[in-house]
Amino acid sequence: MQINLTEIPGGATAAEGFSAAAFAAGIKYEGRDDMGLLFADKVCAAAATYTSNRVKAAPVLYDAGIVGSTSGGSARAIIVNAGIANACTGEEGMRLCRATAEAAARELSIKAEEVLVASTGVIGMQLPQEKLEAGAAALAKRLEPGIEAGNRLVRAMMTTDTFPKEAAVSYEVNGRKATIGGCSKGSGMINPNMCTMLSFITGNPCLPPLLLQKGLHAAVSRSFNRVCVDGDTSTNDTCIFLSNADPEIYEQMPADQQQQEYQAYVEALTIVCQKLAKMMARDGEGATKFFGCRVLHAKDRETAERLSDSVIASPLCKTAVYGSDANWGRFLCAMGYAGAAFDPEKTDVVIESSKGSLQLVKGGQAADYSEEEATAILSEESIWVICDLHQAEGEDGCSGESYGCDLTYDYVKINGDYRS
């Protein structure tokens, strides 16, 4: 199903009925907002995905008790802090999650179980309760609708990010207009393994929590799970979707319209998530280039995505892109250890940027190409490596793509003194 989508300004407050706020609570940073609040005008159907890391931060465990990663749930507010991750903090960390949710609920005159919490920053430090509670009170008083409020929210949750990441689309399905918009933060400790960052997405698709949850997993598998900056999967990764539409609208639809409603939701959500994912890849810590890999004509999508993931995760591929070096053997090598079957002797490799495209490999061997032209293509800020497997042609072939960045000296500098 194809729907007419329109990109619109804004992020998590692009849809009507959502407001946001930011506040400088002094959690860790000086002279900048470090707490944010996203609030819905009514209780929302909710879906969420969380980190697959066995070491899970307290906010991940807390939120999963309210919005399960298979069942969904309901929520009305998300309160977030930057600077301290509240990870590896034991029962005290869980207590601080509850205290933060209760403080926000009091100020918002809602139930504590309607408040989700999120944290990002240094692992192992305890959050200061008095600053969290003061921040919750200040945030509740500053809530505003509109694009600017949403932008302040995403800036408040940034750590090593260099720019805010927001995306939104509008679409029409079954004669009803809908909007989906979201924000995310993340530039390091990112590897495809659900999730890879913090992301808050809102909208008004009229679907029950179980279908919102199913669609969120589908969108995440094509977006956030396709990002790799450095091969590390965070303890705090969380993606939350809130919908303030009435699910009864869906229940009253005939079966064909229900299917259209769900498909439109998944398509729109996937586009928003992919835009956010690509921004995160481009903003990788110390990165100078976006580095994507697209695998074509694979026998199935799993094969394509496993191979593309391996290429963009490889430090040697990343450094080749950084150095504008057409060292195509590294791309084939990374595919070879990905654990997916393909025939190297049937594989072609092309590089592409705004300077054009150039075939480096034909049938597993070097093509006749100009090193100078290859260097020029790889010197641009956005690079794609395209690998054609020729496993299945035409409509029988499947494709997959992954998003990453180059690996630079600055990545080591940033992470060498992250706590200082």
Image: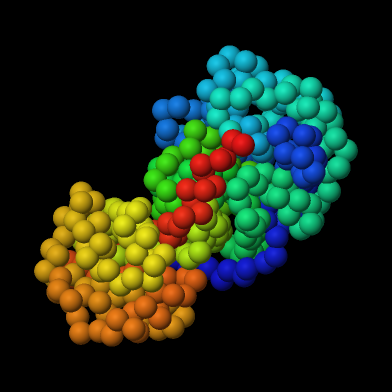
The residue shown at (42%, 48%) is 230
Residue 403 position within the rendered picture, expressed as x and y whole percent measured from the top left? 43, 59
**Left or right placement of residue 7 versus residue 312 in this view:** right
Q: Is residue 158 left or right of residue 269?
A: right
> 314 or 35, which lies in front?
314
Q: Nearer the viewer, residue 129 or 115?
A: 129
Q: Position of residue 99 (x, y in %)?
A: 72, 20
Residue at x 56%, y 40% (from the top left corner): 417
399 displayed left or right of 59: left
Q: Which image quadrant is residue 335 in? A: bottom left
**Quarter of the image holding residue 119?**
top right
Q: Residue furthest right?
A: 141
Q: Position of residue 212 (x, y in %)?
A: 53, 45
Image coordinates for residue 354, horizontal then vertical, percent? 46, 80
Q: Answer above or below: position of 245 versus 91.
A: below
Asked whether the viewer can see residue 257, the reply is no
In the image, residue 3 above or below residue 300: below
